[in-house]
Image: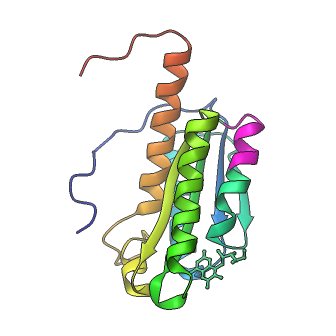
Amino acid sequence: MTGAGAPDDQPVDCHDLRVAVVAARWHEQVMDGLLAGATRALDDYQVEEPGVVRVPGSFELPVVARALAETGYEAIVALGVVIRGGTPHFDYVCSAATDGLARIAVDTGAAIGFGLLTCDTEQQALDRAGLEGSQEDKGYEATAAALSTAMTLRNIRRGYAPESP
Ligand code: DLZ
């Protein structure tokens, strides 16, 4: 199970955080599950009026995430699915999206939720999509991680001392 060891974080109040979700369109059923998971997390964390932007494919996630970060969004959740069997460009699309998203987080200081599934088969993606019968809920996890990180960044910028472990 890929999710073994994941933290069991409890939702915190993020009602005044500026949050956007950027989601690719490839692999509709899996994307529907990831988006539903993200929506559940946004509700649990009390995010008000999150923005949602769709892009054609995962390759386009970083450039749109960057534009959102530059216009003041503090947390951006990137959702996409790339399936090895479905594309000869698997490695290129995965690394462009992954490297691009990591760079945006470090360069802009926005919290980026990494909800990009990179799978060998569609079944693996379905297992992680938070659908009925799925074993994992990566849309929820990526959203919770982005929100938690954004609150940590906000506290650091406001001069609050980091919490002791
Ligand atoms: C072209 C392509 C292929 C073959 N497979 C996927 C995929 O599995 N998942 C995904 O999100 N996007 C895919 N794409 C589209 C690229 O991400 C991109 O949208 C196009 O190359 C146009 O720039």
User: In the displayed structure, would residue 148 be above or below residue 62?
Assistant: above
In this rendering, position of residue 164 left or right of residue 41: left
Count of labels shown?
0
* Residue at 57% over, 46% down: 103
Q: Which quadrant is the N terminus positioned in?
A: bottom left
Q: Quadrant of the C terminus?
A: top left
Residue 11 rendering spot, x and y as whole percentages: 41, 38
Predominant SS along the magenta part: helix
Q: Where on the picture, by quarter, is residue 39?
A: bottom right
| Residue at screen point 73% across, 67% down | 55
At a point 70% along the width and 47% down the height, the residue shown is 66
Q: Give percent across and percent down for residue 125.
A: 42, 78
What residue appears at the point 45 percent right and 56 percent down from the top-left corner? 140
Tell me the quarter of the picture where residue 28 sits: bottom right
Q: Work out whether residue 25 can be spotted.
A: yes
- Span colored in magenta: 66-73
Q: Is residue 64 depicted above or below 84 in this figure?
A: above
* Residue 46 position within the rendered picture, expressed as x and y whole percent measured from the top left: 55, 39
